[in-house]
Image: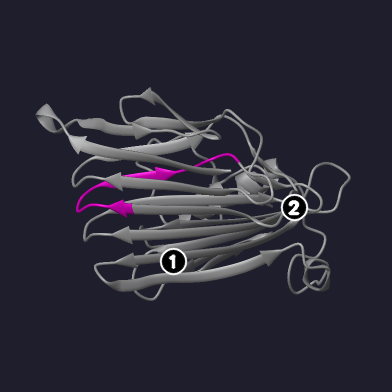
Amino acid sequence: MRAEAAIETAAGAGGRTVIERLASAPPLTLRQTGPRTVHLISTAAGPLGGDRLRLDLRVAPGTTLELGSVAATLVLPGDGPSMMLITAHVGAGATLRYVPEPTVLAARSDHRLRVRLTLEPGATVLWREEIVFGRHGEPPGRCHARFDATCDGVPLLRQEFTVGDPALDGSPAVYGRARCVGTTFLTGRAAAPAVAEGVAVLPLAAAGTLVSALAGDAVQLRARLEWGERQAMPAPRPGDDSVAYGGEPASPGIR
């Protein structure tokens, strides 16, 4: 299967965001669910082996887009590897929040995930990826993921990782007994590196922060990533109800 989908925003009257273009092709079906919010709704199984899928995002200067999904993405085996390419361009002063549900690697699947993120000066981004190592009780399929983020021609982050290689997965230096891996890239910069159980927060050299987490299940993974994300965000205002964890708001699953 070959499928492409796209979202483009534009600035409307009074500075509001308008979803100017929403193009879908199963299994990449898009639905606008709020003034600045779009959700991916899977209308076909997949990606299956051999599928080639592409999603293009263009966030116009000064506008805001939040993209989520209504359910996890299940990667299934088939004839050869599947490919998902996501390209995103975030204009000056624009905001993109990319927060889909996890990707689950079914046994014997073989997937390639490529993200190419381009930012203009003043853009704000939160980009979260979560990968689950197979369905309950099964070994994971294979996934090779690459993430490239660039701002105004300057590289911010170049990252690759592989899931589903038996020589790596069980190593205590890689995933150990974890069943999920996740990362969040943020343009906000944490004041300092931070480490808690199963999660690390790393301020990047040029700008931004990378949060990396491992966990035994998807619920724990999300909690750890959200804790890490808060390290790169402004401190709570006086009167905020958050409970402190090491000087920062706490999150379930972080001990």
Q: Residue at x 78, y 72 (%)?
A: 168
Residue 148 is labelled as 1
Q: Secondary structure at mark 1?
A: strand
Residue 98 colored magenta? Answer: yes
Q: Nearer the viewer, residue 114 or 240?
A: 114
Q: Nearer the viewer, residue 109 or 255?
A: 109
Q: Which mark is residue 120?
A: none
Q: Check disc 1: other Cα within 10 Å, few if <14, some if 14-19, many if 20+.
A: some
Asked if marks 2 and 1 touch (Cβ < 8 Å), the reply is no
- The residue carrying mark 2 is 109
Q: Which residues are magenta?
A: 89-101
Residue 31 at what x, y percent from top left?
A: 43, 26
Is 250 in front, or is 134?
Answer: 134
Asked if residue 88 lies in the magenta stretch, the reply is no
Q: Is residue 211 above or below residue 49?
A: below
N-term-proximal mark, 2 vs 1: 2
Q: Amino acid at mark 1?
A: Asp
| Amino acid tagged 2 | Ser
The label nearer to you, 2 versus 1, is 2
- How crowded pointer 2 is (Cα within 10 Å; few <14, some 14-19, many 20+) is rated as many
**Above/below status of 3 relative to 215:** above
Q: Decide if residue 85 is on the left or right side of residue 215.
A: left
- Vertical comparison of 236 with 87: above or below: above
In which quadrant of the rendered view does residue 92 lie? bottom left
Residue sitting nearer the eye, 204 or 191: 204
Q: Is residue 215 visible?
A: no
Q: Is residue 36 visible?
A: yes
Kindly identify the residue that appears in the image at 74 percent across and 45 percent down. Answer: 217
The residue depicted at 38 percent of the width and 35 percent of the height is 239
